[in-house]
Amino acid sequence: MHLLRSVVLPSVESLFQPDEIDEIRIVNADGECAVKIVAHGEATEAYLWSKDLGYWNEHYAQEKLTSELQDFISESTFGWGTFREPQDPHS
């Protein structure tokens, strides 16, 4: 739950509108932690942590996830060709 609040939700909320997200799920298996996100029926999965990572912190994980989600959006049917800059969802 901590990764969801500290890493995943800040990245997702900065790039997506609330009505775009269908599902967010944390998946833990085999020494790895990933997040699966479904938006407008299209799914992506991004690794948040792996036992093979030498250096890890929440800030790095959030930046990595945000970058991967920007790529996902720009390659999706709902965001094709657009590059979304992270926005503060609370402003």
Image (cartoon, rainbow, N blue to C red):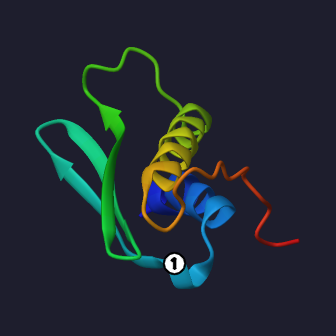
The three-letter amino acid code for the residue at tag 1 is Glu
In the image, is residue 41 above or below residue 5? below
Q: Nearer the viewer, residue 5 or 76?
A: 76
Q: Nearer the viewer, residue 60 or 73?
A: 73
Query: The C terminus is located in which quarter?
Result: bottom right
For the point 68% across and 53% down, the residue is: 84
Q: Is residue 25 visible?
A: no
Most extreme residue toward the right, as rendered?
91
Most extreme residue toward the left, as rendered?
30
For the point 43% across and 58% down, the residue is: 76
Q: Position of residue 88 (x, y in %)?
A: 80, 62
In the image, is residue 46 above or below residue 1? above
| Res 22 → quadrant | bottom left
For the point 34% across and 20% down, the residue is: 53
**Label 1, on which residue?**
20
Number of numbered tags placed on the structure image: 1
For the point 21% across and 51% down, the residue is: 28
Instruction: Describe residue 63's horizontal placement relative to residue 72 as left or right.
Output: right
Instruction: Describe residue 58's horizontal placement relative to residue 72 as left or right.
Output: right
Q: Nearer the viewer, residue 8 or 69?
A: 69
Query: The N terminus is located in which quarter?
Result: bottom left
Instruction: Describe residue 85's horizontal placement relative to residue 53 as left or right.
Output: right
Q: Is residue 54 visible?
A: yes
Near mark 1 (Cα within 10 A), the count class, few <14, some 14-19 or many ≥20, is few
Q: Position of residue 18 (x, y in %)?
A: 59, 81
Most extreme residue toward the bottom, as rendered?
19
**Circle 1 SS class:** helix
Q: Position of residue 8 (x, y in %)?
A: 50, 57
